[in-house]
Amino acid sequence: MSVLSNSAQMILKTGLSLAGVLGLAALVASPASAESAIRGSVSEVTPAGFVTTVSGEAVLPEGLYYPGAGGDYVFTGDFTTAGVPVLTINGGEPTVVPVATAGTTIKQAVIAELDGLDPATRPGLDAYAAILKAAAGADGLE
């Protein structure tokens, strides 16, 4: 005999499926600026079966990010002193997030790009025409 009724089993399965989908969506939709906080943990299991875990997190204020130490994030655990686990987190020197200069619009960006082209040459003319067509398709150059 089943412990749960059919409807309870259906609700449980649906809930677990929904939780899985939401978890996957959270992973896929993570923000691009996630490197403003880095976290890590390290665990040691002794031969006697004791587990020691240490975790840490470094969070920067808004407008800064961790570029990584040499392009990588380094997490180092040290358990040499009994009872004193150490976790070293190295995300590199905090760097200011670059921001667009004030007053830059699509129109100004297109004009700057077109000024750098030479329409007297075939490649320059092709690029010039392609940029104008693309800009005109995005609500024009208002």
Image (cartoon, rainbow, N blue to C red):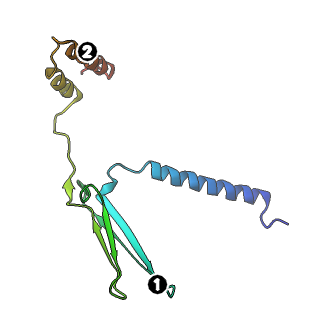
Q: Is residue 127 left or right of residue 3?
A: left
Q: Decide which of 84, 64 is in the foreground and name it.
A: 84
Residue 20, how many percent across, how many down? 57, 54
Q: Decide which of 91, 12 is in the foreground and name it.
A: 91
Up the image or down, 141 lies above or below 28; here it is above
Up the image or down, 25 lies above or below 72; here it is above
Q: Which residue is mark 2?
A: 126
Residue 140, how many percent across, how many down? 28, 19
Q: Amino acid at mark 2?
A: Asp
Quarter containing the N terminus: bottom right
From the image, state whether disc 1 or disc 2 is nearer to you: 1
Residue for point 26% across, 57% down:
68
Q: How many marks?
A: 2
Q: Is residue 26 left or right of residue 61?
A: right
Up the image or down, 132 lies above or below 87; here it is above
Q: Amino acid at mark 1?
A: Thr
When asked about the image quadrant of residue 35, the answer is bottom left
Mark 1 neighbour density, 10 Å: few (under 14) some (14–19) many (20 or more): few
Query: Gap in Å between the C-alphas at discs 1 and 2?
Result: 68 Å
Residue 31, how many percent across, how many down? 37, 50
Query: In the structure shown, which secondary structural element does the residue marked by tag 2 occupy?
Result: helix
Q: Which residue is mark 1?
A: 46
Mark 2 neighbour density, 10 Å: few (under 14) some (14–19) many (20 or more): few
